Amino acid sequence: MTSPVWHPFTQHGLNEPIPHVVRAEGATLHLADGSSLIDGISSWWVTTHGHCHPRIAAAIARQAGQLDQLIFAGYTHEPAEAVARGLVDLMPQVPGRDRLAHVFFSDSGSTAVEVALKMALGYWHNRALDGLDEARSRILVLEHSYHGDTIGAMSIGERGVYNAAWTPLLFDVGTIPFPHPDREQEALAALAAACAQQPAAFIVEPLILGAGGMLTYPPHMLRAMADICARHDVLFIADEVMTGWGRTGTLFACEQAGVAPDIMAVAKGITGGAIPLAATLATPRIFEAHRSTDRARLFYHSSSYTANAIACAAAAENLAIWREEDVRGRIDALVRGIADRLASLAGHPAFANPRQLGTIMAIDLLAADAGYLSDLAPRLRAFFLERGLLLRPLGNTIYLMPPYCIDAQQLDSVFAALVAAGDRFGMSS
Ligand SMILES: *Cc1c(COP(=O)(O)O)cnc(C)c1O
């Protein structure tokens, strides 16, 4: 019997196996046929502490029996209040910069990004109504970026085969060159020139571009870009949807650069990866530009499940875990564990460009046909699946982003599979 399910980012015509998972714990997925997989990418970058963390599962169960869902326009509940307070406490603080002090909830990273764009344009729109500024609407983005799959989020992301069908719907943006090591000054000059044209905002994935190929750039570049925006009064939006919650070694990537953005989007690990929730944080000036006795200026965005109480309870428990458990110690151990093993790949002739940022490791496989649409990615997926490993390479870039609870033995077997993939698919072999 064929399934009626239409899967995301899945070419059903290739008839790849679709494993049926029945249970998960820690870094392990258990399949219906009794076998198991190591989850090497945290089930698409969301699972932080491990699957089915007992504290988060219990918080969800408690909340589900008490208050499940509540209209969030004009109403509130303690789980949302607790998450908002907790988030504000955790935001990067930089002397002389306003704090992110206002929290707007939504349900996914894409939506959190859309909300960030709407806040930025709303800010300039409302200032223009007051005669304080010209209305600004242009968005600047970094080359190779990914910010989600809704229309606005696609508009500010890299254009390619994955959004070609919708080009007529996408709005125009200004693209700043990715700051490769030999092009740092070029990128900064391009940003300064673009900022001089008074755009509304510049949005970046801090320190690492995820779906764009796990491309890293150093903290001093993030800092320099934020400083240019501040000088030109261009709103600086940090998309920490992937980088947040310890992924890059610190709670948020912006911390490593001493950057306090005007707007920040968080999602993925906000509930520990158990249930969808997202938040967009803003500084007081963004909030105040919308606060008025005039109803025309309120922030017109909502979705049915905004700040769902069960999701907020999971997020509140995740925040408590960060406060009460040694999460940072576990992350440090994983960072060392990856660094120690990366050497086994770095010398392999089939691999190039090994890189690590915190708990994220990536390496490029030197294969004959390595384009995004080559059949390399499905063949690699199948190869890893046979070896009990869930990995999903981006073209010829193989990356790891495991839950923080993955143990040394599991890491060993992951790296053994990577070496075997190099032996099997590398151009030199
Ligand atoms: C995953 C991701 C998004 C989109 O988040 P969804 O929850 O999948 O909508 C946005 N920005 C970045 C940087 C991401 O990695």
Image (cartoon, grey):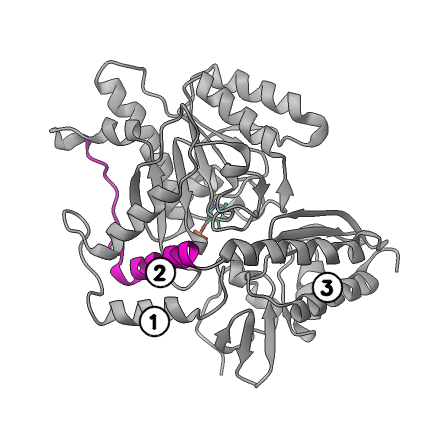
In this figure, which residue is indicated by the disc labeled 3? Answer: 415
Specify the segment rendered in magenta.
Answer: 297-324
Q: Is residue 298 magenta?
A: yes
Of mark 3 and mark 2, the one earlier in the sequence is 2
Residue 308 vs residue 21: left or right? left
In this figure, which residue is indicated by the disc labeled 1? Answer: 58
Of mark 2 and mark 1, the one earlier in the sequence is 1
Q: Residue furthest left?
A: 293
Residue drawn at (44%, 61%) of the image: 273
Quadrant assignment for the C terminus: bottom right
Q: Secondary structure at mark 3?
A: helix
Residue 394 vs residue 320: left or right? right
Amino acid type of disc 2?
A: Glu
Amino acid type of disc 1?
A: Ala
In the image, residue 235 above or below residue 374: above
Observer-nearest residue: 262 or 386? 262
Give the label, 3 or 1, closer to the camera. 1
Cβ atoms at labels 2 and 1 below 8 Å apart: yes
Q: Position of residue 205 (x, y in %)?
A: 52, 39
Amino acid type of disc 3?
A: Phe
